[in-house]
Image (cartoon, helix red, strand yellow):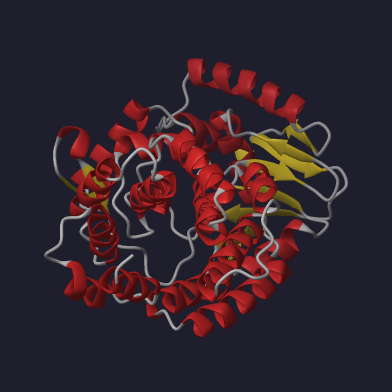
Amino acid sequence: MDSLITAAARALAAGDPLGALNRIALRDDAPALALRGIAMAQLGDLDRARLLVKKAARAFGPKEAVARARCILAEAEIAFVSRDLGWPAKALDVARVTLEQHGDRANAAHALHLEVRRLLLMGHLDEAEMRLAWLDPAGLPPALRAAHDLVRAGIAIRRLQTMPARAALARARRAAEASRIAGLIAEVERAEALLAAPAARLLTRGRERVLRLVDVESLQQSNALVIDACRYTVRDSQTVVSLTRRPVLFLLAQALGEAWPGDLSRDALVARAFGAKRADESHRARLRVEMGRLRAVLRPLAGVAATKEGFVLTPRRAGEIAVLARPVEEKHAGVLAFLADGESWSSSALALALGASQRKVQRALDDLAASGKVQSFGRGRAQRWTTPPVPGFTTTLLLPGPLAGA
């Protein structure tokens, strides 16, 4: 490898894409094309970066397996940043194995981190944690150690384990500062800000209070019966009931939880669950059926009793009922939570991440666009959606839930 290629590679590793381009901008050999593609990706021109990396992969000969694997790794990272979650993950896995077999431990570790970050983004926490356990970060360069601990912190945050998250972020900050890469240091700072930002609202006995992640963790470990509108579950200290696939039952449970210790009228329950302004006989009949289903589902946790005016929820073991609501009420909060990362998303990638159909996601995006909350650019398969993040709020708790209102 000649001196210009070596210098450009070192500039990219230090987070200096302009310095790299100054050395190789006019060259069209395969190594230069690959480095130019990485530089353009660091500068944010992802379409140009993708073309350059693909051209470099074709330019490398069949005997240059490591170079081709590195190009696949670069293309996978561009796809991840572009939120192209449909990019073939198998190709990245093959590239990682090739890099490991040829002793390129650093790039193999980077490939593994990309796989884990994709799993984390899609909410597959167990698989992400299992994959991450394959890698020992000792001996890796500071930038990769920081990436490793950022992923660990992400898993801990999604599991509401704030102490392990803080410890991982502290390690990530030390490694990022040792790498002297400004963008990496900023990423760690954004992750640290999540722990101090409002994460949810607590509704109990007619009062409302904003909670941080550590407060949410404490609530989940308390003796309260928690009706969690962020994860669509009802839980106490011993039992968790998921209502992710039963949105009407969850809306009824949430309404009764907000009214506790009092009851809630049948008209109010009909309006909350079915969207009707006044309850007629058909609505009342449907309400009786749904309340019977809710009573059966929540039997281990609480009783659902009829009163003269409506229904009341009574916990069996817990001392009180608390409703955990999203920090910002929004019909399509799940979609907004993903878009709030500031990246551009395709509707197909959002559908994969949310576990919903692409048509449902498209309807949600159309509704949000009509109200000016999101915007799109491009057409057809190239269409992407984006929105600025909601300032001062963590969206972590919004991500695992289903597509509300779709």
Q: Residue at x 59, y 34 (%)?
A: 244
Q: Is residue 312 visible?
A: yes
- Measured as percent of width and height from the top left, residue 55 is found at 22, 45
Q: Residue furthest left?
A: 26
Classify residue 213 by image quadrant: bottom right
In the drawing, does residue 145 fall left or right of residue 305? left
- Measured as percent of width and height from the top left, residue 137 is found at 65, 65
Q: Nearer the viewer, residue 14 or 277?
A: 14
In the drawing, does residue 119 fall left or right of residue 379? right
Q: Nearer the viewer, residue 10 or 47?
A: 10
Q: Residue at x 51, y 78 (%)?
A: 176
- Measured as percent of width and height from the top left, residue 120 is found at 55, 49
Q: Nearer the viewer, residue 53 or 186?
A: 53
Q: Residue at x 48, y 59 (%)?
A: 395
In the drawing, does residue 387 fall left or right of residue 218? left
Q: Is residue 403 visible?
A: no
Q: Nearer the viewer, residue 17 or 121?
A: 17
Which image quarter holds the C terminus? top left
- Measured as percent of width and height from the top left, residue 270 is found at 51, 31
Which image quarter holds the N terminus? bottom left
In the drawing, does residue 331 fall left or right of residue 3? right
